[in-house]
Each structure stands twice: as structure tokens, then as C-alpha cells.
Amino acid sequence: MTTTVHAYASPSADEDLVPTTIERREVGPHDVLIEIKYAGICHSDIHTVRGDWGPQPFPLVPGHEIAGIVAEVGSAVTKHAVGDRVGVGCMVNSCGECRNCKAGDEQYCLNGMVGTYGATDRDGTITQGGYSTHVVVTEDFVLRIPEGIDLDVAAPLLCAGITTYSPLNRWAAGPGKKVAVVGLGGLGHMAVKIAHAMGAEVTVLSQSLKKREDGLRLGADHYYATSDEATFTELAGSFDLIINTVSAAIDVSAFLGLVTVGGAMVNVGAPAEPLPVNAMALIGGRRSFAGSMIGGIPETQQMLDFCAEHGIGAEIEVISAGKINDAYERVLASDVRYRFVIDTATLS
């Protein structure tokens, strides 16, 4: 039997989100019913519902930074129990059989991972996201949130946290490594916190110095303005790794000039337009320009455990559901420090 729950949905790419109700599927043998407590607002939510990434199956409930409490489990569930603190990130299913899934890289499922919203699930239904009071997810895609992290600051870790942790982990940020973070927003502030906790020397590269005090407080060792041309001269060839968190066009070749020989620049921001790269910026220093998309389930759990161990949570502003549309405009205006989180108790 399905369950009717309260939610906020986007009716179309041209309309504000509105209150609604949606149906959640019956809890199957391997399913977990989660009472959502908090849902983060990701820039990806805005790109998606406004059509920046193509047509969507409206009406659509966004939200893939979900933190809550297990309310019910299916008869065959072994990984979670009623009352557990749990989270759900950007995906809720995958084939489980391809080589990527078997390697713990479900996000790169060769048969297509199932996104938390706006995707076709294995049963043919369209997934609806976390701007809602409850969600039903197969147990393999439900993460354990350690006791060391409050649920409100944990919610953004399920996207912003893993999106930045994964490349920092894969490119071995740590003691002796110089890491630069481009942009100090929802993703960037998490990259700074995590890279600092890993032991790297961290530099923020931001358009201006207006967030410098915040950057240093969050763990950055240095802070430079990219609007100052001298920055690109002074820091040429300095960094082992650059994490670009900006979801807008930047001069990739200019930033590659800041990478040391054999270093890498990794894009985690997802602008709607292509990013051209001058091949000589790569060839001239044996540099790599790479991309990274969230992380698999094992790595996401590793990230949550790491954040709990180091006392890391997102910097948040908790809002009521009625403020979602205002929050979208503020995100686009870079007027948030650093993640909006919806108190889902206000949905009903």
C-alpha cells in the first residue's frame, strides 16, 4: 500500500516550487522507509528544475541531501533498523551487476544509476526527492550517519560532502600536498574543511576577498582573489591539486597554469555550458584536467565516518519550506553561507 506524504514540487521549468502531496511506494522486503528531518538545497536542484540540464518529468520534487530517521524496514533488511540515523544522497538505485557497481562505483553504473529525483527507477516509476516528509529507498543506498554529526549539518554531506571528498581522496590530498579550492560556496566550503582535515596545505581561490575571514576560519591557510591578475603570476605552478567547485564558466587554461608538473585540476562544479581547454595548458606541464561526480556508496560511508571523526559538518542556514523559492534566488546570488537546509517538519 502506498503512502501519501507532503512535499514541495516544481510544476514546470518556469514556475516556483509549490506545496503538494506525492505517493511513496509500499515498503518492500529490501526497502527502508525514512522519516526525513532535513533536506539540503543543492545548486543542482536549481539547474535541474529550471531546465538547465534538459527537459524534466514535471511535476518534480527535488532534493538529494537527505537526513532522517528510519521509520520502517522491510522483512529482509539487515543493514538498518527502526530508529537509526540515516542519509540518502544523489542516487537511490543501480544495476548492482556491472563492473562499476561491483567495484563500489555505483554512480558510474554502466546501465545507468537511478538519481534520487527525476529518474526512472527499476520499477518504471519516476523518483521524487527529499523536499518531502518521507522517502522509501532500497537498503543498499541508505547511509549510516554517525552519532558525531547532527542531522541538520549532515544533510549537505550527502552531496556537497562526498562530491568534494571523493576527488580529494582519489588524488591523495594530505600532508605535503598543496591543494587549491576554486570558489567558497556550498561545495567549496566543504572542500576546504575536508582538505584541511586530511592535512593538506589549503588555498582558496575566490573572485574577491570578501569571504577571506570565513575561508581562514574553515581551515584555509591562504586566500587569493582571482580578479587580481597578479594571483595567476604569483601562484604559477604552485598546486598539486585544484578542486574547481564553481558551477559557471571559468578560464580553465588560466587555472591550469597554477598546477605543478604532474598535478591535476578536477572539476566538480557542473556548469550548463562547455568549458574549453587549451591543450598546451595540459601538455606544457604534464597536467591533468579531470572530472568527478559524487562517490559510490562505500566511499560515501567512508566520508561520513571521516567527517564524524574530525567533527566536520556543513555550515548551514535552516529554513522553512515556505522559504524555498527565496532560497533559490539567494543561492543564485551567492547569498548563503554556505548551504540552505530545509526543516521538513514545516512541509506539513
Image: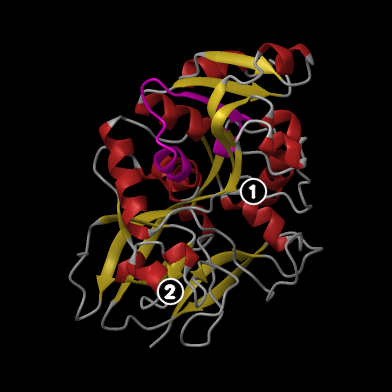
Which element type, helix, strand or loop, lies under badge 2?
A: loop
Task: Name the quadrant containing residue 166.
Answer: top left
Q: Residues within 10 Å of mark 1 (few under 14, many from 20)?
A: some
Asked if residue 181 lies in the magenta stretch, the reply is yes
Residue 275 visible in the displayed image: yes
Q: Which stretch did the figure color magenta?
A: 166-188
Q: Along the line of sight, which residue is nearer the eye, 299 or 18?
A: 299
Q: Along the line of sight, which residue is nearer the eye, 282 or 28?
A: 282
Asked if residue 74 lies in the magenta stretch, the reply is no
Residue that label 2 marks: 94
Figure check: 255 above or below 107:
above
Residue 227 falls left or right of residue 261: right
Total label count? 2
Figure check: 217 above or below 54:
above
Amino acid found under the numbered disc labelled 2: Ser
Residue 133 visible in the displayed image: no
Amino acid found under the numbered disc labelled 1: His
- Among the two numbered marks 2 and 1 on one chain, the one whose residue lies closer to the N terminus: 1
Residue 43 numbered mark, or none: 1
Task: Indicate the position of residue 167 as horizontal and vertical percent values.
Answer: 47, 43
Which element type, helix, strand or loop, lies under badge 1?
A: helix
Residue 192 numbered mark, or none: none
Task: Name the quadrant containing residue 310.
Answer: top left
The residue that appears at 76% across and 11% down in the rendered structure is 230
Task: Indicate the position of residue 105 as horizontal and vertical percent values.
Answer: 41, 62
In contact (CB < 8 Å): disc 2 and disc 1? no
Outermost residue to the right: 14
Task: Name the quadrant containing residue 212.
Answer: top right
- The N terminus appears in which quarter of the rendering? bottom left
Task: Indicate the position of residue 141 as horizontal and vertical percent values.
Answer: 36, 66
Task: Indicate the position of residue 207 as horizontal and vertical percent values.
Answer: 73, 24
